[in-house]
Amino acid sequence: MQALVMAAILASGVATPGSAAPQTAAPESAAPESAAPESAAPDSAYGSVMSPYFAELGRQCPDRRLDKLSPADLRDVLDAFKAGLPPDPRSRMDRAETAACADSLAGASCPNVADIRVAGQLGLIRSLASRVCGAFRSCRSQSDCK
């Protein structure tokens, strides 16, 4: 399903030529590769968006396994994060969601990836990861988070 979500996002034109490249943490602050789920390998379309986010989670709140958040839990944090942004970045995220996910059946996963893609383009991955780390103590397994 991740491949379908990413295909929809890429096909939507959200990442147009001339868009800023996703921001990544400096190599010295990157988390070990094991911090990102295997499906988020940087050589996949999904991974190119999600790897910097997962690496930043690993750097800011290691051993908490917050990459295991359910799409709905991540959506709640993303909505709160967006609400605190100035109008321009918030609008850009809204447009990315609409463009990428209008015909998607992926539930919360599609807008989550669209928002994280824009957060990367705007250099907001660190502040987003900080928000996620502040919202949850840890995950025991996939979608079992407190």
Image (cartoon, grey):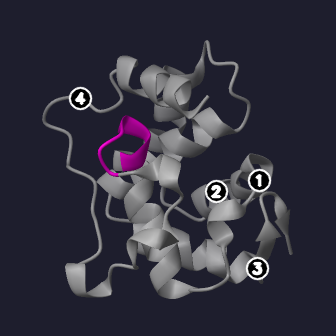
Instruction: Identify the residue position indicated by label 3 in the image.
Output: 138
Q: Name the element at disc 2.
A: helix
Instruction: Identify the residue position indicated by label 1 in the image.
Output: 70
Residue 93: image location, x then y, percent: 49, 42
Choose the circle earlier in sequence order: 1 or 3.
1
Could you tell me which residue is drawn at 73 percent across and 60 percent down?
A: 69
Instruction: Identify the residue position indicated by label 2 in the image.
Output: 78
Query: Label 2 is placed on what type of residue?
Result: Leu
Q: Nearer the viewer, mark 1 or mark 4?
A: 1
- With respect to residue 112, does 143 lie above or below? below
Could you tell me which residue is drawn at 45 percent across and 63 percent down?
A: 53
- Give the residues in magenta: 42-47
Q: Name the element at disc 3.
A: loop
Q: CA distance from mark 2 to mark 1?
A: 12 Å
Does residue 14 appear to the left or right of 36 in the view shown?
Answer: left
Do residues under tags 2 and 1 come within 8 Å of each other at their CB atoms? no
